[in-house]
Amino acid sequence: MNNLPLNRLGEIAKLFLKLGIIGFGGPVAHIAMIEDEVVKRRQWLTREYFLDLLGATNLIPGPNSTEMAIHIGYIYAGWLGLIIAGVCFILPAVLITGIFAWVYVNYGTSPQFAPLLYGIKPAVLAIIINALWGLSKKAVKTRQLLIIAIAVGLITWFAKVNEVIALLLGGIIGMVWLRNGHQTNLVVAGLTIGATWQGTSVTGVSVPLWKLGLFFLKVGSILFGGGYLLIAFLQGGLVHQYGWLTQQQLLDAVAIGQFTPGPVLSTATFIGYIIADIPGAIVATVGIFLPSFLFVPILNPLIPRLRASFWTRAFLDAVNVSAVALMVVTTLQLGITTFTFIKTPYVDFFGLAIFLISVILAIHYRINAAWLVLGGSLIGWGVSILGYV
């Protein structure tokens, strides 16, 4: 009997280390792989129980696929299983991303790398558009939710509202309006008032590790809507508010996140390394993933009651659609930066062509994100031979 927990821990470690290494394609692909392994092959869970866990991950912040790994580790082998499953699933992506970050910092600004990055950025935007297309079809369930999304998007664009406030106020609108449609004007007015709050910029290149870690801990604690919402938080916080990161560095970081296996949130490792070297990578990684390790065991007993509550469902529906709105705003801002030249012809037509081709391949033909990034880099290299970049 004493060997049973050790055997189970070993099984969990092997399984999720393997999935962390081969887990390309984003959270949907990760969840499909996990389901194939733990339901069909190993029969650790029934399909119904697996679906219940999947629904539960939508009720708490954090990356769904990582939280599914943590859930299964916890159910199969207790607290140690929880830790081992999560760490093994995350570790390959973190290590690979860390290596890419070192290469990027030391060689990324060299002329020979510039054409590759030129082609990668439009492909990354196409990947984000593909994610938005899928998320919006699930999130925009009613006309009320569509109106909430438009309101949050417009106020975020024009008033530069903080992303956290936008999500919370969007959720509050959903709770009240979906319960009572006559409260619309009152709540929208409240959102407008809340939108006047803005963060202040911080200048200087020296970033305290505690502040970097606190930023990513906050993001990991409120990241509803999937890993792609991370881009909106990074742009709002690290690019606009603190100035620790340039918009080009953000796009490059997202590209690396798409090109590596495992959870998209390993982008935090890349960004932490850029900002504060190895200590920054460690602090950012721990900060963004730690909440998931805490939320799963703490909130798991409450899941049945949360799912049965109308107020909770309405709040989460509105938060999810608000998250989509934030991602749309961020994508527009990134697109303007990517496709604009300072001098004539002002519009980057080659970049726009890479973007449109990548969108078609992603949405219509469902080409894996890693292949799109690779293809974009090769096109960028080819365009450089023609002397365009």
Image: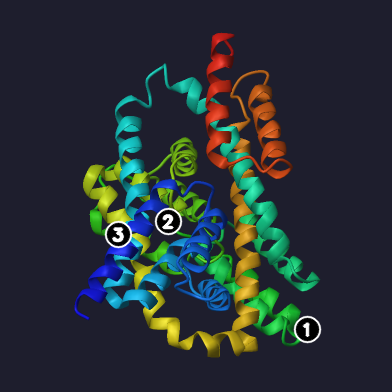
Q: Which of 132 and 36 is in front in this view?
A: 36
- Residue under the image location 33 percent in, 57 percent down: 14
Q: Mark 1 points at which residue?
A: 181
Residue 106 lies in what quarter of the image? top left
Q: Which residue is drawn at 68% across and 55% down?
A: 134
Q: Is residue 204 visible?
A: no
For disc 2, the neighbor class at 10 Å (few under 14, some 14 to 19, many from 20) is few
State the residue at coordinates (35%, 54%): 17
Task: Give the amino acid at mark 3.
Answer: Val
Tell me the SS state at disc 3.
helix
Which residue carries the number 3 mark?
286
Q: How crowded is mark 3: few (under 14 residues within 10 Å), some or many (20 or more)?
A: some
Tell how many labels. 3
Instruction: Mark 2 and mark 1 in contact? Answer it, CB < 8 Å.
Output: no
Mark 1 packing: few (<14 Cα in 10 Å), some, or many (20+)?
Answer: few
Upstream in sequence: badge 2 or badge 3: 2
Q: Is residue 320 above or below residue 362?
A: below
Q: Do the residues labelled 2 and 3 touch (CB within 8 Å)?
A: no
Query: Mark 3 or 1 closer to N-term?
Result: 1
Tell me the number on the disc at residue 200.
2
The answer to which of marks 2 and 1 sits earlier in the sequence is: 1
